[in-house]
Amino acid sequence: MKPNSQFMEKSMCRIDAPFGNITFDEKNDPKERFVQALDESEVQGYLRKLLIQHFSDSWKRVFGDVSTLETILSNIKQHDSEKEKCVGFLVLLFKKDIINHDLAFYLRTQTTKKSVLMDFLHDVIKVYYPNSPFGLFKAGMEKVEGNYFVFVSWAYGKDFCFSKEFFDDESLNSLNKNERTSALWYYFNAMAHQFRSRGDRQLTKELISIASSNSVKGPLTKDSFDILRGLDFIKAWLKFDSQVGRLSYNWIDFFYDFGSPWEKLETLIRSDQSESEETSKLLKKWLEDTKLEFEKLIYVSADLNLVCDEGKAKWASGLESYFISYTNTHIYSDYDYSQLTNDDLNIRLSNAHHKLCSELTPLQISAWIKYSVDYDFQRVIDSNKTRPDLLNSAEKWVCKEYFVPWKKEFLESLNDLVIENQLCILSSCSPFRRGEPEGFYSDFSIWWNELFSDLIESSDFPKNLIPDWTVVAIDRFKREDVLPYIDKSIGVLRGELFKEENEEKIKTYHQKLERLLNALDHSSSRKALRHRLLLMRSSTKPFSDEDISKLGSPFERENFYKWYDSLKQLSDTHYAYQTNGNREVTQDNYKQVQNDFYVNFSHELAEFCLSRLRLRKGEKAKDGKYDSSQVVEQSSIWRQGYLKALIELGFDLNGKVHKTVNFTKKSDPDENVRAIASECYKTVRRHAKKDPSIQDIKRSIIAAEWWLLLCQRQELLGPKSVDHEAALKTRRNLMRNP
């Protein structure tokens, strides 16, 4: 008979098996009994070490009895890691009201009582949460104390919240931006609870106390002290968050974020109805100074090694705004223009700038300089002014202390620009801060002008930019050095002036011509005259109306500007330039000098007219004839005008006129040109003027120009555009009083 298997299974199972290796007898020695409890609960590792270290001697006093101890040890088995078990142990102690008295003592006295429990807590913190109070809080300690501010102050110390570790807490920073910000503002409000719990009147009173603490002796109230600690917390927040790039470098984003008390504070102070006006001013000044202090912290604390180029630009923009706010508040608002000079103001601004720079790193200064340079560049490039200045650079950086880093950033940014914009920048007024040593200014000016002169010497400098460069160069370099560029520039402008695609630039071109021709009048009157005559010839608009009188004053002309005036007036101007201040001109030789000048001017005018009648270089008449395309002046109307001008002037130029004109009367394809050429030949060959008076010479210049203006209008608008009767009247009026 087989035995019953179920019966045999029951009989073979030991009844003590469920107890394992547990000792049925309790240890009598308290330390041994504590270890026994740890063994039975299978507590191992660092937790076991901590528990033995802190509780083996005092566990009865802490836990009361072994049952409580065993219950707690049993409950922490559910946690996986030793770190979780440590926190779980602390939480259970609290739930059993075992450590509640320690926390209560702190809340009552604001001091931490030394106890075995606190020692245990601090060891857990040291090992697992040395720099993460938020991590410990969220791991379970919020069940012990739900107020994060109280918990941190109790467990880590009152001043831990001012440390870098507090704000770099990984657990805290794992929150999204809004959650983290809300948590920190909650912390601030708990620390400076007056912002939340006090009425407006009481809060204002405390703020007045704080604002006047520098001038009024005596201890602050507890409420005022708490507010100040709260403000110190904000400073630490700004400092450490800025260091690692957690801030946007826009103080508005911070101060008016959710949970911030700043808006309430501003509203409270601005609506303050203090009996004393002085008190109101004091409060407002304190608010502004505090805001500026906080704002500055954002920028001076930043580690730009951690920031990209775009971030550096935002940082520098914010710093620039701060500096403007600071100077407006502390310098311009207090500046008495009736008592202080501009030099005084510049010194104060310079000192403020130098003081701020002393708090910045070299990298921060470089970033600010780059921002200033780039801002100046954009402002100058976008400006409609002829020569705007590099204001930021001039005010802050072009000085002995900062010239080297400014020069580096300036050249790097300059080289990144297209050459047109480079010219625009270097055409600006020399950026230079007043009050610098003369030697520094001299060296800087040389360097600045070298940059400008090197520009036009580059192989890729566009031809159309030569006039722009030259207009600036006139004021920077010696006239004889600039003369070749003036000459070339006018030629370039003449070519650009009458292109249809440049219609919108006409006014600008004429303004440049005015400046260039005026400079040429002083340097080379002969070239200035020639350029004006060429511009007259190439113009697409007549310089006169139907009665051959000039169109209005130089300031009223639409199609040509102040650079053109009558040839008679031009001759007078050139004469004044040559004789004013000339010691060789005396009372005795004045008449002769004057006569020689006007004769020479007439010769130059005649030379130009003659040059327009000659064949172009390389061209030859065939069978004694040429066609219009072979002549320098291809228009038959203009050839007639130049011949008429030669008749009026009456000079043969040592035979050059009659020889050229003789060739014209024989070979020109136009019958009218040949006829006037014959008339001109007879005039200058047989009746050349000898020893004419100055009045006669001036009349001949007027008459010559009259013909040129007439043929210009007829060429452009046709014969019917001239009122010949009125034109004759104009001529006679001009000739009466030269």
Image (spheres, rainbow, N blue to C red):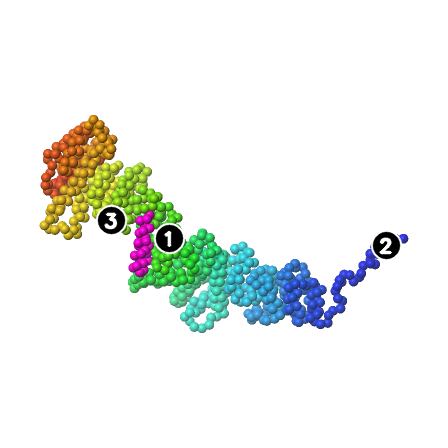
The Cα atoms of the two marked residues, 1 and 3, are separated by: 29 Å
* Residues packed near mark 1 inside 10 Å, few (<14), some (14 to 19) or many (20 plus): some
| 202 and 598: which is toward the camera | 598
Q: Which quadrant is the C terminus positioned in?
A: top left
**Is the residue 325 above or below the residue 100 in the image?**
above
Which of the two labelled residues, at mark 2 and mark 1, occupies the earlier sequence position? 2
List x then y, in percent, for residue 687.
Answer: 10, 35
Q: Which residue is mark 1?
A: 410
Which residue shows up at 44% across the image and 54% down it?
Answer: 312
Q: Tell me which amino acid carries mark 3.
A: Arg
**Is the residue 188 above or below the residue 421 in the image?**
below
**Left of 599 or right of it: where is 85?**
right
Query: In this view, which residue lies farthest toward the bottom?
Result: 218
Q: Which residues are magenta?
A: 428-455
**Is the residue 509 above or below the residue 2 in the image?**
above
Please check the rendered image and state whether residue 445 is part of the magenta-colored stretch, yes or no.
yes
Q: Which residue is mark 3?
A: 479
Q: Are marks 2 and 1 in contact (CB under 8 Å)?
A: no
